[in-house]
Image: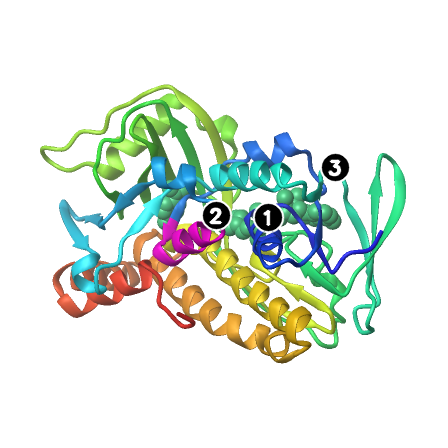
Amino acid sequence: MRTQVAIIGAGPAGLLLSQLLHNQGIDSVVLEARSRDYCERRQRAGMLEQSTVDALRAAGAADRLDREGLVHHGIHLRFDGRNRHIDFPGRTGGKSVTVYGQTEIVKDLIAKRLDEGAELYFDTPVTAIEGIDGDTPRIRFTRDGVEEVLECEVVAGCDGFHGVSRPAIPATVLKTYERVYPFAWLGVLADVAPSTDDLIYAYSERGFALHSMRSPTVSRLYLQVDPDADLADWPDERIWAELHERFALPGWRLEEGPIIDRNITPMRSFVAEPMSFGRLFLAGDAAHIVPPTGAKGLNLAIADVRVLADACVEWFGAGSRAGLDAYSDTCLRRVWRAEHFSYWMTTLLHRDPDAPAFDRRFQLAHLRYVADSEAAMTTLAENYVGYAWNE
Ligand code: APR
Ligand code: PHB
């Protein structure tokens, strides 16, 4: 098999990249380890920056997003018996964000790609990446139990945090930066209309809670839990009781409904540098992870592949490697800004079980400042809607 761009992984990064390349007349093959059903069911985040919505629209993959996406003009910050609504458009030159599940984006892109006859293969794990320091890299993968080889000119490693792409960069070249947090998120999908207009980010002495949504009839709720928490210890009654306590505000009520999905996500900050080596280019979770508090993971993945698609157009169209050579530095500027914002939101809102009482006083002082200072609210707003490095 031969193609121009071999794409490893059919998450949002790999799928959108193959769509953007196709729209520019560049061939790709997407190899995905898991089944289509698995990829389409996995519950993930769902907060899109305006630039992410614009990218999906420009790619021609936003019909359902435009119909079903929920536009939000701000967030609520809740702590210490207070609720501060932070408006975005007035502080960011008119920008908003859109709630639309990553799962839905994946479904839309898979359907569109297959409709257009894309070479997109599920149940096809990549086992090795060879020759990335030469001109014709080779990808080894397994299909129906048989090992096959795909030759290409460019390899896009869109295979998430646990994939095979990042380890293909020599250890002498790759530098990684990591921070692990002493908590995780328990996320539930509940069959009940959201109890709020905009998302609620709540800090309490019992820990962080987030009220998000997926549609006018489905709520998405998160609770800070211990990093080693077990879903078996979290029956529905305990989840609701904890949510009620953490969101408590006089005059406000959280509606309960049947829980239809639940999962626990660890929290980490991680960056790999550089994001490329020879003909291999990492994109999305393969190169970086953010804790979900700032809602940046999906947006960073989309931003990476926009840069990579443009660089491929330069390479295959004009024969210039300039875009590919600049890829890592271009992406890392945005990545580190989002890493810092995600860390900042995380430490602002979570209860660190090991922090001394002194630090908790600092945290409350910081929360009050963010909720009262115009400058601080503008900082939060401009980062949340997406700080524009490349636009
Ligand atoms: N061969 C083929 N595919 C692989 C391999 C492999 N060896 N290893 C992993 N994959 C696949 C995974 O099965 C997964 O479907 O790569 C895909 C990576 O997709 P995602 O994890 O969704 O990563 P990405 O596209 O970068 O999207 C990042 O996902 O975790 C969230 O918060 C994150 O929203 C962000 C988004
Ligand atoms: C979500 O809706 O899943 C979501 C929203 C905002 C976040 C994280 C997750 O910060």
Identify the mark nearer the N-term, 1 or 3.
1
Query: Which is more foreground, mark 1 or mark 3?
Result: 1
Q: Nearer the viewer, residue 357 or 56?
A: 56
Q: Position of residue 306 (x, y in %)?
A: 52, 62
Instruction: Name the kind of residue labelled 1 in the image.
Output: Leu
Q: Residue at x 30, y 27 (%)?
A: 241
- Judge: label 3 CB < 8 Å from ligand 1: no
Describe residue 171's horizontal placement relative to residue 12 as left or right: right
The residue singled out by tag 1 in the image is 15
**Element class at badge 3:** loop
Q: Which residue is mark 3?
A: 123
Relative horizontal placement of residue 107, taking residue 79 as reference (left or right): right
Q: Is mark 1 within 8 Å of ligand 1?
A: yes
Q: Is residue 110 visible?
A: yes
Residue range of the region highlighted in magenta in the rendering: 48-59
**Callout 3, which amino acid?**
Asp
Q: Residues within 10 Å of mark 3 (few under 14, many from 20)?
A: some
Between 167 and 26, the one lying in front of the other is 26
Image marks 2 and 3: residues in contact by CB distance under 8 Å: no
The residue labelled by disc 2 is: 60
Sequence-wise, the earlier of marks 2 and 3 is 2
362 relative position to 269: left or right = left
